[in-house]
Amino acid sequence: MGITYNGKDYLLKFPGNLKEQKMKNINLSYSNSPVCEYIGSKIYELVRLPVHNTILGTRNGKTVVACEDFLQDVPGVKEHFWNMFIMDALIGNSDRNNSNWGIILRKDGSKDIAPVYDNGNCLNSKWDDEKMRIVMNDADRMEAEAYKARRCIFELHGKRINPYHIIESRECPECLEAVYRLTPQIGNNMDKIQTMIKEIPILSEIQKRFFISIIECRYEKVLLECIKNDCVH
């Protein structure tokens, strides 16, 4: 649904109806994708990467996220891709496929990479409080969910990859460059990320703790460890 707010155009994104999808082991009636879209986008914003502007709101009793129409210049394609790869690893966005990032083609023939958008499938948006509580109370399950057992949409040799293994291997120079480029910015803004999440009134205390804990885990045990191990080697 399109809206105009303070003179700017936005696209409203609604939570998915999970009951209609009849998904196994999912107890929520509606997904948390709007608030996860908001958090994921704001984390991109805090580390100063181009991303669409988002605003949380409600419509018909449901939480929605308004995504601002965008048109702006951004860096080169490869750098942009690896920036997204690292940031999506941080927020746990496993669905960054080649249909939800792209290039703006203007009528005059000029081209620009679109700002980052479609961040709703991050931070376990389909989980309820009880599932988050169970995982947080089990260190092994928390590490598995944070990075050890994760997969994303991209494939290598015909198999979906674990993005954290790609980062930890340090075998891709462009990926490692993005780690060095973004990790200091993430660390410098970690307090702001935590404060931003804590100040979202519609989140439960369990959700706030889970989102902050899983982001910290990925930052400390994947990104910082990658830099530390690279310095050793």
Image (tube, helix red, strand yellow):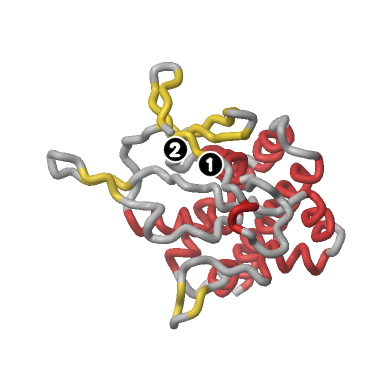
Describe the element under mark 2 as helix, strand or loop. Answer: loop
Q: In which quarter of the image is residue 89?
A: bottom right
Up/down of 12 relative to 81, above or below: above
Q: Do the residues labelled 2 and 1 touch (CB within 8 Å)?
A: yes
The first of marks 2 and 1 along the sequence is 1
**Residue 149 occupies which quadrant of the picture?**
bottom right
At a point 32% along the width and 47% down the height, the residue shown is 113
As shown in the figure, which amino acid type bears the numbered disc 1? Answer: Ser
Q: In this view, does 202 lie to the left or right of 48?
A: right
Where's the N terminus, which quadrant?
top left
Residue under label 1, please give it: 41
Name which residue lies at 63% across and 47% down. 31
Q: Is residue 134 left or right of residue 27?
A: right
Residue 156 horizontal/vertical position (percent): 45, 77
Q: Which residue is drawn at 79% across and 49% down?
A: 129
Secondary structure at numbered mark 1? helix
Query: Horizontal and vertical percent for residue 165?
Result: 59, 72
Residue 17: percent from the left, percent from the top? 59, 48
Residue 88, by quadrant, is: bottom right
Q: What residue type is labelled 2?
A: His
In the rendering, which numbered label is found on residue 52?
2
Q: Is residue 151 visible?
A: yes
Towards the viewer: 26 or 150: 26
Q: Which residue lies furthest to the right in this view?
A: 137
Q: Which mark is residue 126?
A: none
Quadrant holding the C terminus: bottom right
